[in-house]
């Protein structure tokens, strides 16, 4: 279908829905690299105007990635809940934006709507929203998940404790874990990005975290962020696997570049649940995503990177994860050039994920060759916290010494809690108080030299 609109005396024509979506996107370097971006502000505005007038139902009849060639498209369309979609089925994209910002869009209503929305619908409406719109609408989307604690309750913000080490040294990892716990971090997950893919080493890392969790009865979960096939093998070997991790993307071909299929993700889900290690829930999957991954794999099908990112959330929600994390600035300036683009992408990702029913956290981060700095991350962190982000990262000093990128620190989480009154997962909050890490007001208590955590050893 051809879409067209005149702006300032110039008629702009868009060759199909994918082209319209790409031209309507806020500027980002990845879409420029792919040759998909609008070539002028006038063309971008024309595309947004046409998109705003496009019925939401269009996305059910015009697939951006061919149905017969892509299992992600088939998943999205085959599982679409028409009854859930019915309340907004007659709206245009612009009308949907207005409705999302209205008092009619309550948390309960949005939760019922989520199965009726496709990722393309979420991406489309995000493209015509200002940053404040993305923040307000996302703040009304609430989703709760559980394993050993409760993630996503209103007024809470969890933190993934990320104790990475360039050589997977147990002493170094343990020091980072204890440091993070003493700062009140770790309720989302204690998650290690391993330097090695050796199964014996991965099993040792799992046992290291499990020993700490069991010894101090910490109501949290652990994860070694290895390939899903390694997690399945470790389950079969009897390793203490809490969460099963996998990076995912928004097309079948991009997922193939990660070495995964939807059936393999189901196998990982089944393997994780077979251990029954969760005490209050069975959300065992942890997914990470990032704008630009499909393009970097040559698997984008001519679709803009933000729409494909939203499709990754469509994959994630099908497997009922505990956590989904957009590693927003990690892929580099080829895809998100500077702080402005990273901030916008982080708000888009959070909004789209939460709207679709995925428990979205954001790794507020950048690489050292991007035109960004920690002030940009402070801005994005603050905006996401007001929008109700599910979780963020807690990295010692905000500098990941294994992955070589800049993220958020244990102190950054304290800043958000002080500013906005965000609490931790309730079970974890109670544990912190019980171990006198926090006082009656929820703030950190002075640490004594004899505190049991400070005397722990790897």
Image (spheres, grey):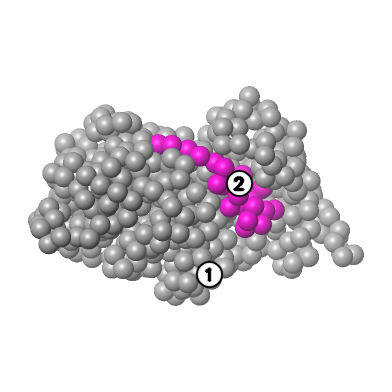
Q: Chief secondary structure of the magenta span? A: helix
Region of the chain picked out in magenta, as a range? 122-145
Q: Is residue 27 above or below residue 432?
A: below
The residue at 40%/36% (across/down) is 145
Q: Which mark is residue 339?
A: 1
The residue at 16%/37% (across/down) is 237
Q: Which mark is residue 137?
A: 2
- Would you say 55 lies left or right of 150 here? right
Q: Where does the image place residue 357, in percent across and percent down from the top left?
A: 51, 38
Q: Where does the image place residue 111, in percent across and percent down from the top left?
A: 55, 33
Q: Where does the image place residue 279, in percent across and percent down from the top left?
A: 26, 31
Which quadrant is home to the N terminus?
A: top right
Q: Which residue ends up furthest to the top in the rendered image? A: 83
Q: Is residue 134 above or below residue 9?
A: above
Question: Dot 2: within a 10 Å radius of its alpha carbon, few (fewer than 14), some, or many (20 or more) residues?
Answer: many
Which quadrant is home to the C terminus?
A: bottom left
Q: Is residue 137 magenta?
A: yes
Q: Which mark is residue 128?
A: none
Circle 1 sits in a helix, a strand or a loop, which is it? helix
Q: Which residue ends up furthest to the front in the rendered image? A: 440
Q: Is residue 221 magenta?
A: no
């Amino acid at each position: 279908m051809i879409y067209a609109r005149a702006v300032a005396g110039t008629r702009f024509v868009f060759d199909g829905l994918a082209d319209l979506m790409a031209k309507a996107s806020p500027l980002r370097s990845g879409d420029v690299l792919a040759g998909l971006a609008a070539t002028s502000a006038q063309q971008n505005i024309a595309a947004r105007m046409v998109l705003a007038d496009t019925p939401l139902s269009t996305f059910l009849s015009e697939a951006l990635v061919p149905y017969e060639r892509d299992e992600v498209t088939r998943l999205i369309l085959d599982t679409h809940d028409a009854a859930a979609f019915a309340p907004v089925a007659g709206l245009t994209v612009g009308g949907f934006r207005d409705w999302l910002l209205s008092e009619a869009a309550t948390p309960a209503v949005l939760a019922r709507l989520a199965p009726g929305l496709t990722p393309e619908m979420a991406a489309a409406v995000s493209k015509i929203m200002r940053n404040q719109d993305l923040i307000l609408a996302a703040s009304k989307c609430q989703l709760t998940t559980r394993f050993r604690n409760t993630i996503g309750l209103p007024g809470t913000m969890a933190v993934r404790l990320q104790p990475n080490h360039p050589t997977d040294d147990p002493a170094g990892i343990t020091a980072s874990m204890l440091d993070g716990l003493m700062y009140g971090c770790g309720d989302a997950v204690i998650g290690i990005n391993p330097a090695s893919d050796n199964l014996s080493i991965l099993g040792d890392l799992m046992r290291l975290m499990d020993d700490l969790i069991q010894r101090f009865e910490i109501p949290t979960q652990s994860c070694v962020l290895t390939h899903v096939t390694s997690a399945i093998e470790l389950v079969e070997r009897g390793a203490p696997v809490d969460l099963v991790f996998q990076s995912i993307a928004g097309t079948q071909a991009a997922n193939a570049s990660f070495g995964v299929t939807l059936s393999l993700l189901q196998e990982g889900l089944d393997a994780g649940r077979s251990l029954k290690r969760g005490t209050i829930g069975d959300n065992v999957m942890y997914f990470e995503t990032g704008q630009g991954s499909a393009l970097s794999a040559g698997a984008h099908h001519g679709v803009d990177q933000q729409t494909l990112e939203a499709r990754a959330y469509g994959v994630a929600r099908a497997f009922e994860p505990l956590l989904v994390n957009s590693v927003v600035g990690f892929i580099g300036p080829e895809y998100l050039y500077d702080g402005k683009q990273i901030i916008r992408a982080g708000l888009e990702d959070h909004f789209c994920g939460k709207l679709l029913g995925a428990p979205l956290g954001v790794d507020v981060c950048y690489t050292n060759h991007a035109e960004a700095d920690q002030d940009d991350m402070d801005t994005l962190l603050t905006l996401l916290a007001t929008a109700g982000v599910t979780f963020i990262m807690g990295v010692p000093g905000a500098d990941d010494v294994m992955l070589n990128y800049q993220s958020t620190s244990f102190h950054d989480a304290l800043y958000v809690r002080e500013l906005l009154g965000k609490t931790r997962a309730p079970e974890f909050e109670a544990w912190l108080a019980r171990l006198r890490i926090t006082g009656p007001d929820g703030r950190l208590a002075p640490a004594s030299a004899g505190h049991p955590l400070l005397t722990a050893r790897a």
